[in-house]
Image (tube, rainbow, N blue to C red):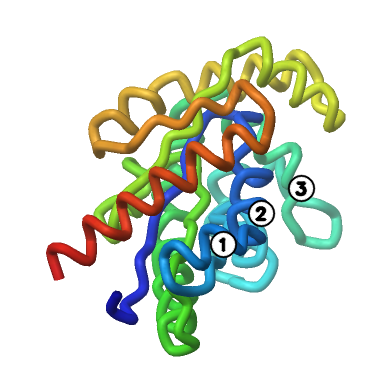
């Protein structure tokens, strides 16, 4: 196998288990052996939180779009920002216009660092892989699909309210069609984590092998 870095997106609706799956795949020595190198994970939401805290221009633009999200100290109230975004499609679109270019740039930086360190596979976790523009920069994508009731229970187990789940779930209604549009491989995430990891590992092996054959 060559030493090039493969970048694969992990997408899915709210509480589908993306972060748990990514962490388990990173820890899988079996997957590392199969693809010939280390696996790492980058979370688009975490990059966004960091950018909102450190990028003064981005923070100012966000607070111009959603002034109610400004805290007394000038920082962003992330919970209030999310609530307004998921309740108003126009606000959500504006925030995506502001934030996704920043995320794409940050992921390119992470990718360059991973490539320099000889990482074999970088998992890019993001809900909106298509409309963010990230899909165009990846070698493939997995769509983690879980039943709505399973996701609702998971969301509640981590402290989320029923109303918040309904808002987020409704705002993400177009994601399955978007994932189909980019040719993402569907992984069943309704079962146990080991079952999901096994299915995702098999898919990732195929993606890496297919990528090798086209190099």
Is 86 situated above or below 62?
above
Kindly indicate the quadrant of the structure image that contains residue 44: bottom right
At 22% from the left and 66% from the top, the residue drawn is 212
At 56% from the left and 67% from the top, the residue drawn is 40
Q: Which residue is mark 1?
A: 41
**Can you see residue 4?**
yes
Callout 2: SS: helix
Between 62 and 10, the residue placed more toward the observer is 10
On the image, the x and y values in percent for residue 158 come to: 83, 32
Callout 1: SS: strand
Q: CA distance from mark 2 to mark 1?
A: 7 Å
On the image, the x and y values in percent for residue 19 come to: 64, 46
Between 4 and 168, the residue placed more toward the observer is 4
Q: CA distance from mark 3 to mark 2?
A: 27 Å
Q: Are marks 3 and 2 in contact (CB under 8 Å)?
A: no
Label 2 neighbour load within 10 Å: few <14, some 14-19, many 20+? some
At 28% from the left and 57% from the top, the residue drawn is 139
Position of residue 29 in the picture relative to residue 99 (left or right): right
Position of residue 100 in the picture relative to residue 71 (left or right): left
Label 3 neighbour load within 10 Å: few <14, some 14-19, many 20+? some
Is 23 situated above or below 160?
below
Residue, far left: 214
Kindly indicate the quadrant of the structure image that contains residue 173: top left
Q: Earlier in the sequence, mark 3 or mark 1?
A: 1
Q: Earlier in the sequence, mark 3 or mark 2?
A: 2
Q: Which residue is mark 2?
A: 23
* Mark in the foreground, 3 or 2: 2
Assign the C terminus to one quadrant of the image. Answer: bottom left
Marker disc for residue 77? 3
């Amino acid at each position: 196998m060559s030493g090039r870095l493969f970048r694969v997106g992990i997408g899915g609706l709210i509480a589908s288990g993306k972060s748990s799956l990514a962490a388990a795949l990173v820890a899988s020595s079996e997957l590392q052996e199969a693809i010939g190198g280390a696996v790492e994970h980058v979370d688009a939401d975490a990059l966004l939180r960091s950018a909102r805290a450190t990028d003064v221009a981005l923070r100012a633009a966000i607070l111009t779009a959603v002034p109610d999200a400004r805290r007394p100290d000038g920082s962003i109230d992330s919970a209030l920002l999310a609530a307004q975004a998921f309740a108003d499609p126009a606000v959500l679109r504006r925030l995506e216009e502001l934030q996704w270019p920043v995320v794409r740039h940050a992921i390119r930086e992470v990718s360059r660092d991973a490539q320099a360190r000889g990482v074999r596979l970088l998992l890019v976790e993001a809900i909106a892989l298509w409309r963010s523009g990230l899909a165009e920069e990846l070698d493939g994508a997995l769509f983690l699909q879980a039943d709505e009731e399973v996701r609702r229970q998971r969301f509640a187990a981590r402290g989320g309210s029923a109303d918040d789940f309904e808002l987020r779930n409704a705002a993400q209604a177009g994601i399955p069609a978007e994932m189909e549009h980019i040719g993402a491989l569907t992984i069943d995430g309704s079962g146990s984590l080991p079952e999901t990891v096994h299915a995702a590992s098999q898919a990732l092996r195929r993606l890496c092998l297919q990528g090798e054959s086209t190099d």
